[in-house]
Amino acid sequence: MKLHYVLVPLLSLALLSTGYAEEKKVTKAHKSVEQTEAKAEAKPEAEKAEKAEPAADKAAEKPAPEAAPVAAAEADKPAENASGISKEELRALIREILQEELATLSAAQPARSAQVSKPSEPAKPGEVLAHTCAGCHGTNGTLANDAFMPLAGMPEQAFVQTMLDFRDGKRQSTLMGTVANGLTDQQIQDMAKYFVQVPVQTAEVSP
Amino acid sequence: MMLSRRDFLSLLGAGVLASALPVRSAFAAAQPHVVIIGGGVGGATTAKYLKLFDPNVRVTVIEKNPIYLRPYGSSEVVTGHIRMEDLHVSYDTLKSKYGVEFIIDEVVGFDPAKRTVDLKGGRKVSYDKLVVSPGIELLYDKIEGYSQAVADSKVPSGWIPGAQTQLLADQLKAMPQGGTFLMVAPPAPYRCPPGPYERPALIAEWLQKHNPTAKVIITDPKDEFVTDQTMMLGWNRLYGFNIPEKFRKDIPASVEIKEHSTQGILSWIPKAQGGTPLALDVAAMTVKTESGDIKADVINIVPPMRAGKIASVMGLTDEKGWCPNTRKTFESTLHPNVHVIGDACHADVMPKSGYSANTQAKTLARVLVEMLAGRDVPTPSWENTCYALAGSDYGLYVADVFELDEAANKIKRVGKFSRYLRLDATPAQIRMGAVYQQAWLQSFTEDCFA
């Protein structure tokens, strides 16, 4: 999250400086032919790098020491630019990132801070299949209405036996027979293992 | 020069790699951005499950309407069982609980090389992965004399819920005693396979109470339809419908089929009997079919359809009007890094249903999280469950479990049981189907949107 505080002021300045360069270019364009525009581009980029430096200092006052090195990276850019990024592209990109960073800062902040940020984990065995049940049995089997069986925390053996009974037609159902009949023993066991470890106390029950 | 947002950030970071490692790691951790076009069942479910699987992924939904109108169950508005407002689904929980960002706008342009989409409001949004879940576009003009303007004013479709749904409800109420309601069923493939048969059934039930001398006619360009036998058994028991011989063959002898001496309130004209619709004469309120003209007081047309319009605009559709993809990942075969799900995509035997879109969305969310983490994509699993009603207390269903045939790039159905309600289902099973249908509307909406 700290990254946003560094990026936003930095990018704002970067955008301003490319804007300034744009104005200069327009007056030039009156006199010169369009093809010479390419030449004009390296210069504004250098200006921008200069301007970005003080911004980095300001940003550094806030949370992170990362800002100054970022400015150094900016200084590298004219060289990169020569390799083919047009200034328009760069401006559009900076503006876009700025918009997005601002949106991130304003809109999604409360929700993000409320969530535990951890790296994603691969799907557990049975999990992919278990999510196919959720349309009726609730997300992760944590159900919020009383017509269907909640599956979260169901004892493994109870889940397996119930599914086998549905599958073999021993237990009357509406569509559970059809659903269970499309599953293998292994798949049913994997699903049972998944559901039993879903904590029931954090079930998402609506008021 | 192609330069994505992530490339740009890493470019910024690259220059300082030697001197300041913390910066590099900060940029390396820049959130991957998944942008989802369409906030229906497919889009909303993808957004929610992406956040469940990996809260670090940034998820933005671009949707033109600030509130979702659910199509599933919307025929209940026509009969006044529920109101239009009951179809409203809010995006608030996806925003507040999961941190999904929403942009209420329309996509007007797309640059697959730069990975950006342009919005009507002027914004440009860049993505690492793009999900397109645009639903359907109704092709009103495919029926001569029909058009969106006619549908909005006189002969509604209501297959995408909205003002046309309310118009149809109003027309039904205003229908003269002894009048005729005509349903023009669509050719396959179409959204909600049992839907064009459930709606007339619910209307027949309503008419029995409020307009008992009225008639319901379904004219159809097909000779069979999803749930046909089980739906017809319901019609037979409830609306005086005589089941055609063709559909009686494998009904067990123990199952009572009523023989009605007079034609009941509901009738069905299949293709073989000239049911294919040819043209609409709005002024005369007449539909011309292969077997002649049908005059009606209220006409409801479900026209042919194809993938939602934005899919064609973005060049994601094939000559059939649907989106080709690699089934394992639902990644478009026409544009990389773009994944199309829901009614709009080709999915073989998977019906164009909300439940299909919901389970496609979850496998896609898993695919994207694994792709972004640089891991292998696990074997996908899909299911479908469509509850349908032949009457308020008469439930039936379609249920499927699917698996991937990766070599053939096909989705196959697995299991030996019938997809449908048993033909010899007990009254209790039939009643429970209706109870579950109502409960499903709630649990399903929650799984997608809350």
Image: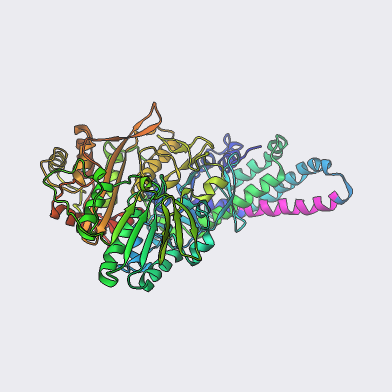
Magenta stretch: helix, strand or loop mostly: helix
Count of picture labels: 0
Locate residue B150, reporting x and y percent. Answer: 51, 63
Seen from this angle, which residue lies furthest top? B407
Q: Nearer the viewer, residue B86 or A161?
A: B86
Vertical comparison of B101 with B14: above or below: below
Q: Determine the residue positioned at 39% across, 33% down.
A: B377
Q: Is residue B176 visible?
A: yes
Locate residue A33, reporting x and y percent. Answer: 86, 44
Locate residue B7, reporting x and y percent. Answer: 58, 39
Q: Nearer the viewer, residue A181 or A206?
A: A181
Membership of A25 in magenta stretch: yes
Seen from this angle, which residue lies furthest right? A31
Membership of B371 in magenta stretch: no
Q: Is residue A137 visible?
A: no
Q: Determine the residue positioned at 68% across, 36% down.
A: A80
Does B229 sit left or right of B96 as displayed? left
Locate residue B271, reporting x and y percent. Answer: 38, 46
Vertical comparison of B279 with B346: above or below: below
Q: Nearer the viewer, residue B243 or A182?
A: B243
Q: Determine the residue positioned at 32% across, 64% down.
A: B215
Give the magenta part as a residue range.
A10-29
